[in-house]
Image: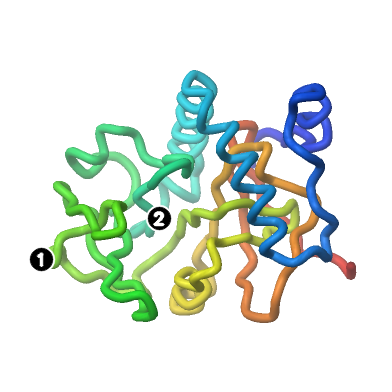
Amino acid sequence: MHGGRASPGAADAAAGPGGPPPAPPADAPKAAWRTWVHERRRRWAADAARRARDEAAVHALLAAWDTWRGARVALVYLAFGDELDPMPTSARAAPPTNGPRLATTRTVGARAPLELRAWSPPFERHAFGFWQPRPDALPVDPEAIDLVLVPGLAFDVHGARLGHGQGHYDRLLPRIPQHAARVGIAPDPLVVERLPTEAHDVVMTHLLTPSGLRAVAARGPA
């Protein structure tokens, strides 16, 4: 486990009067949280220098983590839009030679389960604009996955995740072996004290932000 975490409240204070509005209460609807998070993510992504520093820090932390280096197969995501990219740019041209074998997801329909395919550049662009493996990329058995890098709009300090609301990862994560590390990845300003949760939400085992990598404990009562 590496590093700590900057306080979201401290980050808001540092932003000054022109900073983002305060976070919604923990029991606010997820829609209200998504509105707040999208604005916060937009501000983070607009600072190209900060984004580059944050992504370089995440790459270094991941490469140094014994669990990552010891994994046989890791399921990772192809960053899209304002997502923090967990993989160096060079990985889009050729699979990394160090660390685990990589798999990623392929979307075949709005409600169809995500397919798991080998990380095999070059990737194709989906009609919605994101990149994914080509149809001929080799399938990967979910049971082979030792570690998952999970994108999210935001996470809380107990490992709860706020997604886009489509449910793709809610349906995917239960297919992954229980022993696999589930690593939520986000910029530090998008890790908050508590998010609203539902019964189907799958909690992360670890959080990885530019300030550190750490295991997370289950949340207590609201």
Query: Circle 1 sits on which residue?
Result: 136
Q: Give how far across and how far down residue 133 sits, in percent.
A: 21, 58
* Residue 218, x across and y down, in percent: 76, 64
Labels 2, 1: front one: 1
Q: Residue at x 78, y 31 (%)?
A: 12
* Side of 141 where 26 appears, left or right: right
Nearer to me, 191 or 118: 191
Q: Nearer the viewer, residue 32 or 82?
A: 32
Distance from the alpha carbon under mark 2 to that under mark 1: 25 Å
Q: How is the image coloured?
A: rainbow
Question: Where residue 112 appears, x then y in whole percent?
Answer: 34, 80
Residue 147 location in percent, x, y?
A: 45, 59
Give the amino acid at mark 1. Asp
Q: Which residue is mark 2?
A: 71
Classed neighbour count for the residue bearing mark 1: other residues with Cα under 10 Å, few (<14), some (14–19), many (≥20): few
Q: Is residue 100 above or below residue 213?
A: below
Q: Are marks 2 and 1 in contact (CB under 8 Å)?
A: no
Residue count near mark 2 (Cα–Cα under 10 Å), binned few <14, some 14–19, many ≥20: some
Could you tell me the amino acid type at mark 2?
Answer: Ala
Q: Residue at x 49, y 19 (%)?
A: 49
Decide if residue 125 is on the left or right side of residue 76.
left
Q: Is residue 40 above or below residue 124?
A: above
